Image (cartoon, rainbow, N blue to C red):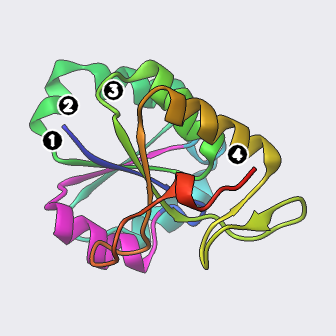
């Protein structure tokens, strides 16, 4: 069962390992990312960052969708992590179980604008977000579980 899908461009790091994983009682972290799934060094690095209490699976988007739609995955308490709005939208279209998405961290880069202290979006991201909102998804911004949920629609003004 997916406990949370989180967009975080750092994927697995301290906030994920030491706050989100225990708060969700997650026993499995699934990183869904086409590039990382092919990068042995990145897989090793993420493996070092994962909490000891959880298994780490790194899959392409397509393989993550297959895995997460398999009834056997329902026995796991999964924290699903992607690094972009676009990747989250791909999984929303493939996995009916996803009804809510946490925006945890998307760093500022060229072509983005900050909508909160930890989230910077492109115009394309905002269009995708509006499409997901139209599908009835809950899209919330929180860096850590104890933060108050801020609904993303209150932060985008385009």
Q: Which residues are magenta?
A: 12-32
Residue at the far right in the pictured view: 110
The answer to which image quadrant residue 34 occupies is: top right
Element marked by disc 1 = loop
Q: Earlier in the sequence, mark 3 or mark 1?
A: 3
In the picture, measured across the screen, residue 28 lies left or right of residue 50, that is: left
Asked if the stretch drawn in magenta spans residue 148, the answer is: no
Q: Are marks 3 and 2 in contact (CB under 8 Å)?
A: yes
Q: Nearer the viewer, mark 1 or mark 4?
A: 4
- Quickly name the residue at label 3: 67
Residue of label 1: 76
In primary-sequence order, the first of circles 3 and 2 is: 3
Residue 15: x and y in percent read 39, 77
Nearer the camera: disc 4 or disc 3: 4
**Alpha carbon separation for disc pair 4 and 3:** 28 Å
Q: Which mark is residue 158?
A: none
Mark toward the start of the polypeptide (1 vs 4): 1
Q: Quadrant of residue 26?
A: bottom left
Q: Residue at x 34, y 35 (%)?
A: 99
For label 4, the residue is: 126
Image marks 2 and 1: residues in contact by CB distance under 8 Å: yes
151 up-or-down from 2: above or below: below
Q: Among all residues in the image, which is located at the extreme left?
A: 75
Dot 1, how many residues are within 10 Å of its Cα: few (below 14), some (14-19), or many (20+)? Answer: some
On screen, residue 5 versus residue 25, left or right, reads: right
User: Which badge, 4 or 3, is on the more N-terminal residue?
Assistant: 3
Residue under numbered circle 2: 73
């Amino acid at each position: 069962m997916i406990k949370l899908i989180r967009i975080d461009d750092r994927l697995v790091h301290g906030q994920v390992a030491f706050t989100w994983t225990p708060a969700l009682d997650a026993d499995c972290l699934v990183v869904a990312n086409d590039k990382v799934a092919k990068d042995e060094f990145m897989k090793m690095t993420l493996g070092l960052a994962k909490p000891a209490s959880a298994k780490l699976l790194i899959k392409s988007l397509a393989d993550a969708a297959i895995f997460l739609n398999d009834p056997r995955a329902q026995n796991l308490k999964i924290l699903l992590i992607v690094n972009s709005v676009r990747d989250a939208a791909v999984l929303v279209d493939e996995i009916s179980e996803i009804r809510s998405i946490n925006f945890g961290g998307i760093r500022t880069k060229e072509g983005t604008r900050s909508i909160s202290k930890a989230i910077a979006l492109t115009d394309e991201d905002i269009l995708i977000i509006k499409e997901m909102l139209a599908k009835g998804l809950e899209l919330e911004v929180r860096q850590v579980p104890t933060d108050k949920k801020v609904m993303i629609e209150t932060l985008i003004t385009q």
